[in-house]
Amino acid sequence: MDFIDWAEHVFSELVVLHKADSFNRSIGVDERKLAAAIFGEALSRSPDFYTSRKRMAILEALDDLKRCGVLEEHSGSRGFYKPSPRVRGLERDFIPLWQAICRDGLDPDQEQLLKAVAELSHFEETDFGRVQEVGDDPVLASLGWAEGMDKAWPIVQELDNGGLIKAVMTSGPSFEARVTYRGLVWLNKRAFTVEAMFIDELVKEWETTSVEFKREVHTDTPGEKAELTKDVLALVNTQASGQRWLIVGFDNGTREWACPPDPKLTQDHIEQLMSVYTDPVIDVRYEVVGYRDGKVGKLEVLRNPKKLPYHVKKSVGDARKRVEEGDVFVRHGSQVEHPTPAELRALEEEGDRARAASS
């Protein structure tokens, strides 16, 4: 288990214990109660409890969660913790916390030092995660900076002040440091949180002239090929500003994540379909990204004004879903339809202007 999962597990167990009785709710939960809940009573009553690695792992998680502001330590009874009132529901969804952490910006040197400390101080066990202080010699050796401590010293202080590492600075100068929960989240969850925030914004607006959501996209049958061709043509032809997206995996009724995309839907496969069924060939970018509850397909449709209007190159479909050679499609709000004569003329004129400008 890595330390991110471990710290979040400790938090979730603490929330359960906090709600269990009036003492826990008023004063808080200590390390021994957490150890009993997570590992069993035998460990919490063991004479070796205070020197055990599992106890240290609990303390490290509690300390880091407190530094993140999601736990409060009782002012009159040190070592007793309860959830901060600001983080209700966090045990069910840590993404808002990840997003807050990942908004912090780091320069390349700060990121490089954070990575070095994380690689040297983070350890995974079967049923818990650990972080352990590492001295400056292995950190500097890993970095290979010619300036050595002169360069590292202020950056260690900056990362410590930001809560991304926990450092002890001594005269010499020298330091011991370990990565924190916050630091590991920044390193390992940034790509995920950026995608989650981006998709959240699209979901908030839902379907527009430049965004379409699909629960599922398959291309096994002629009708399914026709439907995808039609949807992509409509996105690329519609006169709208900004990027054009087809997002796969969301239910149209609930507007919530429903299922992962068909694994057969890949960049190469979609490019092949576009080369067969669209003229000029529509350029696309497709990737599968992580989201809150599962994987999401993200298809970006790239519009080149010099190629307008795009149309169906080859007829395909069945009795229910079919496109014919020469068909042009646009979006009217969230609906896919043939363009009006005025819209088609506008597309042709836009294409003519773009081609003339580039000649």
Image (cartoon, grey):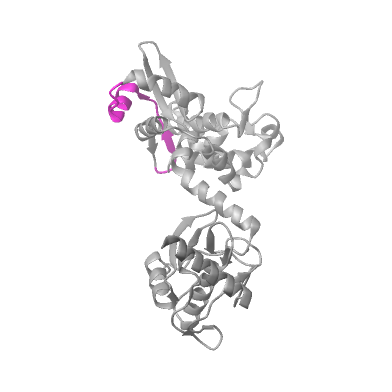
- Residue furthest to the bottom: 319
Q: Where is residue 15 in the image (x, y as percent from the top left)?
A: 62, 40
Q: What residue lies at 71% left-to-right and 31% top-to-bottom?
A: 26
Q: What residue lies at 53% left-to-right and 41% top-to-bottom?
A: 8
Q: Quadrant of the C terminus?
A: bottom left
Part of the protein shown in magenta: 126-147
Asked if residue 304 lies left or right of residue 27, the reply is left
The answer to which image quadrant residue 90 occupies is top right
The answer to which image quadrant residue 154 occupies is top left
Residue 264 visible in the current orientation: no
Q: Position of residue 336 (x, y in %)?
A: 60, 74
Q: What residue lies at 40% left-to-right and 77% top-to-bottom?
A: 276
**287, 293: nearer the viewer:** 287
Q: Position of residue 77 (x, y in %)?
A: 64, 22
The answer to which image quadrant residue 120 occupies is top left
Q: Relative to 149, does residue 193 appear above or below in the rendering?
A: below
**224, 29: nearer the viewer:** 224
Q: Quadrant of the N terminus?
A: top left
Q: Position of residue 327 (x, y in %)?
A: 52, 80
**270, 216: nearer the viewer:** 270
Residue 226 visible in the current orientation: yes
Q: Is residue 175 magenta?
A: no
Q: Relative to 323, does residue 130 appear above or below in the rendering?
A: above
Q: Is residue 141 magenta?
A: yes
